[in-house]
């Protein structure tokens, strides 16, 4: 079995640097992308520092990333703001391992190296520099997500959650966690800034049936059908109030046992999930002892390009309750057609 130790090291250092950058953003300089979703200087800066790190160590690996530099190239003030953030965030002890970006023009070039089309290739990385941008803008949950996909299988996943409590049962104000997983080697969590070897192994919570579960779902109704998920919870006998948060922090949350079920049900027949929104979380839950499928029980297919076009919906849960959940999900969705 390949250990992917070097890939894991680089991914963790790059994500940690990007998390530091997001925390430096005190003012949310937002603009509108073509799809009208908010994007901040943090998105651009995080993508730049992560791709630069990957290019230094794995220059042949393509990256499927969310952003491009078009807006920055016509807005010099915004570009300079991002460049300052990149420089400040890169003033760390990681330069010998993942390097630093030499100039503002190099920064723009690195951002644009995230435009790979994806598909059936030997190796590629999937990157969401700031997953849950709306959560980031409101001071809620967001995540920096990076995954290595080899022969269409996710083999390394790292998720940085700067606003997630390190241990919500002890001190909810002590925040900042990096989650990591390598296929076949389990899932781990450590506080941001802690030595890499201090990660603690995490596991899905053991539950006897779906009735005892807690739902974790998206804040935005436009991302997932809240009404259908409420009906699913009712039919499963779940009485606990659902936990709503943005980003792949949901995957991380159930992987360490804060919740039990993550549902993301399609709100449109034509919508296709992006691979960068699920690659890292998919592996993290699997390595924590859970399972992730679409709403028909199919594994997520990362070989189709930049989207999961062969899948509809996301259901992540403990293996023993997944069949029960899928049955009810399919019943509820069939009745709404």
Image (cartoon, rainbow, N blue to C red):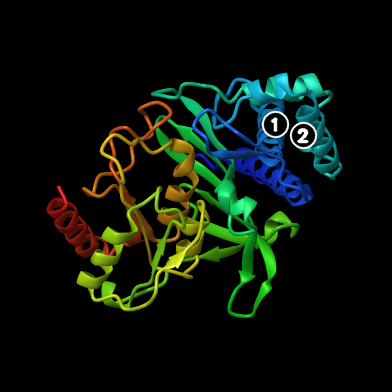
Q: Give me the disc on residue 82.
A: 2
Q: Left or right: where does residue 167 sit relative to residue 214?
A: right
Closer to the camera, 298 or 266?
A: 266
Q: State whether residue 209 appears in this view.
A: no
Note whether 238 is above or below 133 in the view shown. Answer: below
- Within 10 angstroms of label 1, few (less than 14), some, or many (20 or more) residues? many
Note whether 117 is above or below 7 in the view shown. Answer: above
Residue drawn at (65%, 60%) of the image = 163
Give the x, y percent position of residue 211. Answer: 27, 76
State the SS at label 1: helix
State the SS at label 2: helix
Check whether the beta carbons of the residues at disc 1 and disc 2 lie within 8 A of each other: yes
Note whether 209 is above or below 278 in the view shown. Answer: below
Give the x, y percent position of residue 282. Answer: 42, 48
Write down the quadrant of residue 140 in the picture.
Answer: bottom right
Q: State whether residue 8 appears in this view.
A: yes
Residue drawn at (71%, 25%) of the image = 72
Please tell me which of labels 1 and 2 falls first in the chain: 1
Q: How many marks?
A: 2
Q: Left or right: where does residue 211 sit relative to residue 308?
A: left
Q: Left or right: where does residue 256 sit relative to residue 31?
A: left
Q: Give me the disc on residue 29.
A: none
Q: Nearer the viewer, mark 1 or mark 2?
A: 2
Closer to the camera, 68 or 181?
A: 68
Write down the quadrant of residue 168 in the picture.
Answer: bottom right
- Within 10 angstroms of label 2, few (less than 14), some, or many (20 or more) residues? many
The residue where tag 1 is placed is 48
Give the x, y percent position of residue 337. Answer: 14, 47
Give the x, y percent position of residue 277. Answer: 47, 42
Closer to the camera, 113 or 36?
A: 36
Residue drawn at (74%, 60%) of the image = 194
Mark pair 1, 2: CA separation:
9 Å
């Amino acid at each position: 079995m390949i250990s992917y130790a070097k890939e894991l090291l680089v991914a963790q250092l790059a994500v940690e640097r990007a998390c530091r950058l997001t925390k430096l953003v005190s003012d949310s300089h937002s603009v509108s992308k073509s799809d009208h979703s908010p994007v901040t200087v943090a998105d651009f800066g995080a993508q730049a520092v992560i791709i630069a790190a990957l290019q230094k160590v794995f220059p042949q690996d393509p990256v499927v990333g969310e952003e491009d530099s078009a807006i920055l190239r016509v807005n010099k003030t915004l570009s300079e703001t991002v460049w300052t953030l990149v420089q400040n965030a890169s003033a760390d002890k990681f330069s010998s391992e993942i390097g630093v970006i030499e100039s503002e023009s190099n920064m723009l070039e690195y951002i644009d190296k995230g435009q790979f089309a994806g598909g059936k290739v030997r190796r590629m990385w999937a990157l969401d520099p700031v997953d849950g941008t709306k959560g980031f803008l409101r001071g809620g949950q967001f995540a920096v997500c990076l995954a290595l996909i080899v022969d269409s299988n996710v083999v390394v996943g790292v998720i940085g959650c700067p606003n997630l409590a390190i241990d919500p049962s002890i001190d909810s104000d002590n925040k900042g966690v990096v989650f990591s997983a390598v296929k076949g080697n389990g899932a781990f969590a450590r506080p941001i800034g802690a030595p890499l070897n201090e990660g603690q192994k995490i596991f899905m919570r053991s539950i006897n049936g779906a009735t005892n579960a807690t739902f974790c779902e998206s804040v935005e109704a436009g991302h997932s059908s809240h009404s259908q998920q409420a009906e699913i919870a009712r039919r499963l006998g779940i009485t606990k109030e659902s936990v709503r948060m943005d980003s792949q922090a949901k995957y991380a949350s159930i992987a360490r046992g804060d919740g039990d079920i993550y549902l993301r049900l399609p709100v449109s027949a034509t919508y296709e999930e992006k691979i960068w929104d699920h690659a890292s979380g998919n592996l993290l839950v699997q390595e924590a002892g859970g399972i992730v499928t679409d709403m028909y029980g199919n594994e997520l297919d990362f070989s189709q390009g930049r989207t999961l076009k062969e899948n509809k919906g996301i259901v992540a849960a403990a293996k023993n309750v997944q069949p029960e959940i899928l049955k009810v999900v399919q019943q509820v969705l069939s009745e709404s057609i």
